[in-house]
Image: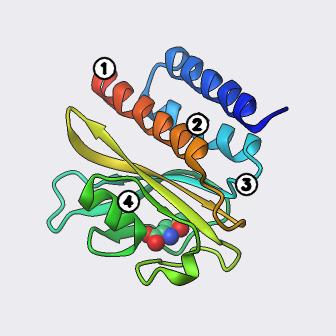
Amino acid sequence: MPVTTRIEEIRNELTELARAVPTARELMHSMVKLLHERMLKYNWVGFYMLEAGANPPMLVLGAFEGAMTPHTRIPLNQGICGAAASSGQTVVVDDVSKDPRYLACSLETKSEIVVPVFVRGNVVGELDVDSHFSAAFTPEHQDLVQHCAMLVGKKLETVGS
Ligand code: SME
């Protein structure tokens, strides 16, 4: 199956999943499982959410699939994760070994994408995907991961956590 058709199929399944589950928490758990199982180059998939009321702000590991990471709490001035949350922008790194911001989760990781999750215009967390393949996150994949982050943001807006 061509890669765009496959991505489209998964995108539609995720949209349907977002309609079907009652809470954002369940959506995040099912989403990371589905992405990790079905997207062969998505070798670690997880959410980091901003801790409520924390000063300084802190990203805390939420639902994830893949190997346990040493980075369960990340301040906003650290890592690719901190960069995405503090800028409110998607960050794509084709070769993590060349990015000084990168915090290693697995020695096998070659590329990474982090997409912020917004609720009413504010960053509340992010979706992080790591790949054992370099430059895995082409524009089609960026669209898919951004769609996922948008679905979670909308769910949080409509039903809360
Ligand atoms: N690589 C991330 C840290 C999270 S782990 O990859 C799961 C970063 O540089 O912020």
Tell me what residue is drawn at x 74 percent, y 32 percent.
6
As helix, strand or loop, the secondary structure at mark 2 comes to helix
Amino acid type shown at disc 4 = Val
Between tags 1 and 3, which lies in front?
3
Q: Nearer the viewer, residue 39 or 136?
A: 136
Question: x, y (%) of residue 90?
Answer: 39, 53
Q: CA distance from mark 4 to mark 3?
A: 24 Å
| Disc sitting over residue 158 in the figure | 1
| Residue receiving disc 4 | 60
Q: CA distance from mark 1 to mark 4?
A: 22 Å
Q: Earlier in the sequence, mark 3 or mark 2?
A: 2
Amino acid type shown at disc 2 = Met
Work out which quarter of the rendered image holds the N terminus and state it: top right
| Residue receiving disc 2 | 31
Between tags 2 and 4, which lies in front?
2
Work out which quarter of the rendered image holds the C terminus and state it: top left
Q: CA distance from mark 1 to mark 2?
A: 18 Å
Asked whether mark 1 and ligand 1 are closer than 8 Å, the reply comes as: no
Q: Earlier in the sequence, mark 4 or mark 3?
A: 3
As helix, strand or loop, the secondary structure at mark 3 comes to loop
Amino acid type shown at disc 3 = Lys
Tell me what residue is drawn at x 53 percent, y 52 percent.
46
Q: Are marks 1 and 4 in contact (CB under 8 Å)?
A: no
As helix, strand or loop, the secondary structure at mark 4 comes to strand
Tell me if residue 159 comes above or below residue 43 in the rendering: above
Q: Are marks 3 and 2 in contact (CB under 8 Å)?
A: no
Q: Are marks 1 and 3 in contact (CB under 8 Å)?
A: no
Between tags 1 and 4, which lies in front?
1
Asked whether mark 4 and ligand 1 are closer than 8 Å, the reply comes as: no
Q: Nearer the viewer, residue 25 or 78?
A: 78
| Residue receiving disc 3 | 41
Tell me what residue is drawn at x 60 percent, y 45 percent.
141
